[in-house]
Amino acid sequence: MPRIDIAEHPGVGLDGLPRPTEDRVVVAADTVVVLDGATEMREGLPSGGWYSRLLAERIGDRLRANAGEDLGTLLAESIAHVAAEQDLTPRRAPSSTVAMLRWTPEHVEALVLADSPVVAFTPDGPDVVHDDRLDRLRAAGALRTRAEVDRLRNSEGGFWVAEAVPEAASHALRRRWPRAGVDAAVLATDGVSVGVDTYGVFDWPGVLRLSRSAGAEAVLDAVRRAEADDPECRRWPRSKRHDDQALVVIDFAADQATIRDEP
């Protein structure tokens, strides 16, 4: 088994006050899933954390009952189950990002839906599976109003996210690598990846080095220190001083070292 290191920190709400994390981590025998419930600002809807918790529970149930099920099928069926059970309406329901990683003796595969990346460390360097559709829409000024966001959520030409549309799973990004060529992999919510993409605290190889030397918790702490140095959110404009953070580091090199050390 590879070594798995998990670290999580709750962030704050839009009001700046502490509140429970809306990130979720699911770990099965050969699969890890990370979800980030979207902050919900529409009146009358449950929180993104409520939705990510239910979706994580359903994904965990399916992983235990259907080992080896295709990741896209597993996600689509899990979205459909939660939507039906909770009577959710497409484009009028809370949502969550999804990042999945599964490994077999032959392959490592990833699925990414919305902006929680998966990074595989290969001989050619870090291979980042990042869904940038939201970023591109924001850059184009296409998400200025709530009505625009609702119209573009889970629609062609828009962005795709786990919500109440099972079809969203078929629009996830997929990647597969030979197991022997993956030294390690990380799954992160954007409260962690912002340290690479926006703050420049480290690059992805730096994330792996720090997590190996000091643990995944140290990566989260480094991001929080950067944010603490920008308390007014002026250097890096953001809606919350601290977002929720979840990071999972899967070290396949440790697995190989164990195999080599066996008599």
Image (cartoon, grey):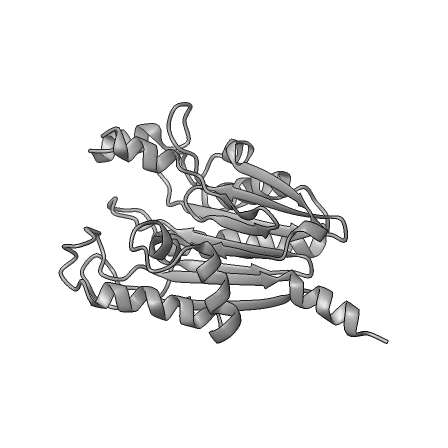
The x and y percentages for residue 231 are 16, 64
The x and y percentages for residue 210 are 46, 68
The x and y percentages for residue 68 are 72, 48
Residue furthest to the front in view is: 124
Question: What is the total number of numbered labels drawn onto the structure image?
Answer: 0
The quarter of the image holding the N terminus is: bottom right
Q: Residue at x 43, y 71 (%)?
A: 217
The quarter of the image holding the C terminus is: bottom right
Q: Residue at x 51, y 60 (%)?
A: 25
Residue 86 visible to the viewer: yes
Residue furthest to the right in view is: 263
Residue furthest to the top in view is: 156
Judge from the rendering whether residue 40 lies leftward or rightward of residue 8; answer left or right: left
Q: Quadrant of residue 234?
A: bottom left
Residue 247 visible to the viewer: no
Asked if 139 appears above or below 106 in the picture, the reply is: above
Foreground residue among 156 and 105: 105
Asked if 256 appears above or below 106 in the picture, the reply is: below
Asked if 124 appears above or below 262 in the picture, the reply is: above
Q: Quadrant of residue 177?
A: top right
Q: Residue at x 40, y 36 (%)?
A: 89
Foreground residue among 222 and 11: 222
Q: Residue at x 53, y 37 (%)?
A: 173
The x and y percentages for residue 188 are 45, 55
Judge from the rendering whether residue 95 lies leftward or rightward of residue 57; answer left or right: left
